[in-house]
Image (cartoon, rainbow, N blue to C red):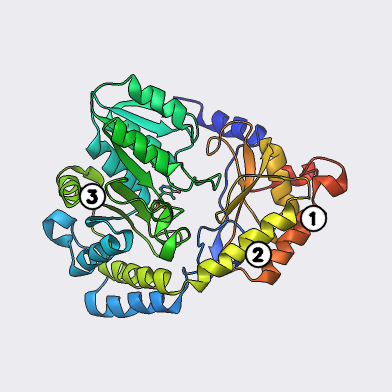
Amino acid sequence: MRDFAGEIESRKSAGLYRTRRTVTGRQRPQLTADGKPLLAFCSNDYLGLAGHPALVESVRSGMGDLGLGGAASHLICGHHQAHHELERKIAGFTRRSAALFFSTGYMANMGVIAALAGKGDTIFSDELNHASIIDGCKLSRARIRTYRHRDTDDLEQQLAETEGHKLVVTDGVFSMDGDMAPLKRLAELCAEHDALLIVDDAHGFGCVGPGGRGSVASLGLSEEDVPVVIGTFGKAFGTSGAFVAGPAMLMDYLVQKARTYIYTTAMPPAIALASCTSLALVETEGWRRTHLDRLIKRFREAVANLGYELMPSDTPIQPILIGDARQALALSADLEARGLLVTAIRPPTVPDGASRLRITLSAAHTQDDLDRLIDALTACAPASAGESPGQNKSAALTATS
Ligand SMILES: *Cc1c(COP(=O)(O)O)cnc(C)c1O
């Protein structure tokens, strides 16, 4: 048998060991984690909708009417009117012809990519794409060619030298960096080279673009430019589930072929009702995006001169690049000692030597919350201390993230 315990030990000594914190009570910036009150800046609840009373009420009344379980897969007898209505609303929200509702974004990527490419085909994938995209590519058994992050010249060259069915897949907003894919150029290249473009906008929907309609809409790109978009309800929408949207023929094809759609139990219909409510809130409560954008600008201005390495991001994902995994843990521990929760992100989630604190901002944060973060970052700053961030090495050894 393999030395599993030994692998765990070597992860510990490399600063790559992972643990979980147990949250009690609601998901909100003022979290209780492992019994300790902390102000969190690492959730994906970007619009602060996860605990919204209207969503809770949708589930409560939905369950009163419809019960709990999904009972069967969509193709047997699990496809409920609540799911169907949600798909219609998603199509409207994304300005696509049709949509399909999945149980999670991970399953959507696995199912969609593996259905739309297969043996003998080629998938072109940005090197920083999300794990679920990478796994979908592997599952498809297509040839996988990664191109350098956001490098459309590299992609163009690879497209030009490849024959056969081609698929290009990218995050819309990159999950660990917060920057955006060059979607306009990607759409042009895909049109030129007859490649199918898939954009996973898990972090863009809700936050970016007119009415929160995502990074594709923010550039005014239509279904013709970007045929397939994927989103999750677990992040800005504050609920659960995911979707793919695009031409009706392709959605029909996915119903035939997407195994993660076909062979799983339908999500509880009451959750789909909550997502319908959430779609409406995202569009109508534009103040959440306005407030969030203000927090993002203030954060970047305040932290710009502290000596940290920020990344080129205008989105709620505002990472501080550290490099070394143990140093990232140490800075995270320093912040935690000041009452803040910002998880360190380490390989293999990010490339070797690119460990970071992935700070995320939310419309649920107040200006005072942000001030607390800025004060703590100032106190831990490399510029003021004259040393590299995360000096508290003893804390690093006991850090739990
Ligand atoms: C989180 C995430 C997913 C997975 O979505 P879930 O609904 O959480 O499974 C897919 N793609 C990207 C880019 C993500 O960040």
Q: CA distance from mark 1 to mark 2?
A: 16 Å
- Asked if 87 appears above or below 140 in the picture, the reply is below
* Amino acid type for the residue under numbered disc 3: Tyr
In the rendered structure, the answer to whether residue 396 lies left or right of residue 199 reads right
Q: Residue furthest top?
A: 161
Q: How many marks?
A: 3
The mark nearer the N terminus, 2 or 3, is 2
* Amino acid type for the residue under numbered disc 2: Leu
Pointer 2 residue:
39
Can you give x and y, in whole percent of width and height, for residue 212 in the image? Answer: 43, 62
Residues at badges 1 and 3 in contact (C-beta under 8 Å)? no
- Asked if 123 appears above or below 133 in the picture, the reply is above
Q: Which mark is residue 378?
A: 1
Can you give x and y, in whole percent of width and height, for residue 310 in the image? Answer: 67, 46
Q: Which mark is residue 261?
A: 3
* Amino acid type for the residue under numbered disc 1: Thr
Q: CA distance from mark 2 to mark 3?
A: 37 Å
Q: Is disc 2 placed on a helix, strand or loop?
A: strand
Q: Is disc 3 placed on a helix, strand or loop?
A: helix
